[in-house]
């Protein structure tokens, strides 16, 4: 059993991975615009890790500040290729172009997680994993996108490594769970430490 806590954003990766670990969370999303938060950071050349941390802290503190006494988890993923931040494709055509761009290359997923209560950060962690895609031909990309459909548009790299996206991957360097979207082991350790989960 776990004591009630809440996600500060509609993060399907976090809900799925926590659910797989036997932890149920509800969503009370922060009312913030990601792009508005990111734009000034990108103009100043902030790193992908810094962007992930700013986004997650803003969401977790905003959401927890509106719900006194409740524990909130914020979790944000920011993808980068050669230090350029990649955003979620707007449509299937942009998604195909993105996979052609990433084909045969190594990109990074930067994941930041925060626990917050009453508008204050209690704990933060940032992790990174490198994902190298296979060389992908346009025909394979077209078949893959037809198979995963709009679900594939949930992440900037278009390949959920804990699902069908693993078919696109040549290798992963770093923690697999971070590559899947949440650094679960340090998060679970902290949740146990503060008594939010009792196993």
Image (cartoon, grey):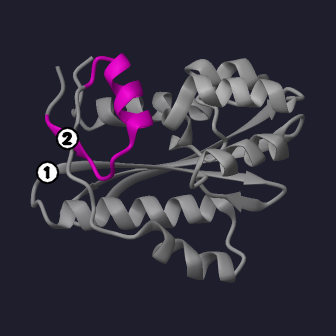
Q: Decide which of tag 1 and tag 2 comes sooner along the chain.
A: 2
Specify whether residue 159 is in view: yes
Q: Give me the residue at 57% from left, 78% from top.
A: 39
Answer above or below: position of 84 versus 152: below
Query: Residue 130 falls in which quadrant of the image?
Result: top right
- Badge 2 density bin: few <14, some 14–19, many ≥20, Cα 10 Å: many
Identify the residue at image location x=11%, y=60%. Answer: 67
Q: Residues within 10 Å of mark 1 (few under 14, many from 20)?
A: some
User: For the magenta stretch, what is the residue range?
Assistant: 4-23
Q: In the image, residue 75 lies at what x, y percent?
A: 43, 47
Q: Which residue is mark 2?
A: 5
Q: Is residue 104 magenta?
A: no
Residue 31, numbered label:
none
Coordinates of residue 46 in the picture (x, y in percent):
67, 72
Q: CA distance from mark 1 to mark 2?
A: 7 Å
Magenta-colored stretch includes residue 10: yes
Q: Nearer the viewer, residue 173 or 98?
A: 98
User: Relative to the observer, which residue lies in front, 50 or 165?
Assistant: 165
Dividing the picture into quarters, in which one does residue 166 lie?
top right
Between 168 and 59, which is closer to the camera in this rendering? 168
Q: Is residue 70 left or right of residue 30?
A: left
Residue topped by disc 1: 70
Q: Are marks 1 and 2 in contact (CB under 8 Å)?
A: yes
The C terminus: image quadrant: top left
**In this view, 11 is above or below 179:** below
Residue drawn at x 45%, y 66% is 34
Q: Residue at x 69, y 65 (%)?
A: 47
Left-right relation of 166 to 71? right
Which quarter of the rendered picture does the N terminus lie within?
top left
Q: Secondary structure at mark 1?
A: loop
Number of marks = 2
Q: Position of residue 59 (x, y in %)?
A: 35, 62
């Amino acid at each position: 059993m776990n004591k009630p806590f809440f996600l500060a954003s509609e993060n399907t990766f976090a809900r799925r991975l926590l659910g797989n670990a036997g932890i149920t969370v509800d969503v009370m999303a922060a009312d913030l615009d990601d792009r508005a938060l990111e734009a000034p950071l990108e103009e100043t050349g902030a790193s992908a890790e810094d962007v992930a941390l700013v986004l997650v802290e803003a969401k977790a503190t905003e959401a927890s500040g509106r719900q006194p006494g409740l524990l909130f988890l914020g979790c944000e993923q920011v993808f980068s290729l050669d230090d350029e931040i990649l955003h979620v494709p707007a449509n299937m055509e942009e998604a195909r172009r993105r996979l052609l761009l990433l084909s045969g290359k190594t990109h990074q997923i930067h994941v930041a997680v925060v626990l917050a209560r009453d508008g204050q950060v209690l704990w933060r962690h940032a992790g990174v994993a490198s994902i190298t895609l296979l060389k992908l031909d346009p025909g394979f990309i077209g078949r893959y996108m037809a198979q995963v459909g709009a679900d594939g548009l949930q992440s900037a790299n278009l390949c959920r490594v804990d699902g069908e996206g693993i078919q696109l991957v040549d290798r992963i360097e770093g923690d697999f769970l971070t590559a899947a979207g949440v650094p679960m082991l340090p998060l679970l350790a902290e949740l146990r430490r503060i008594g939010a989960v009792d196993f």
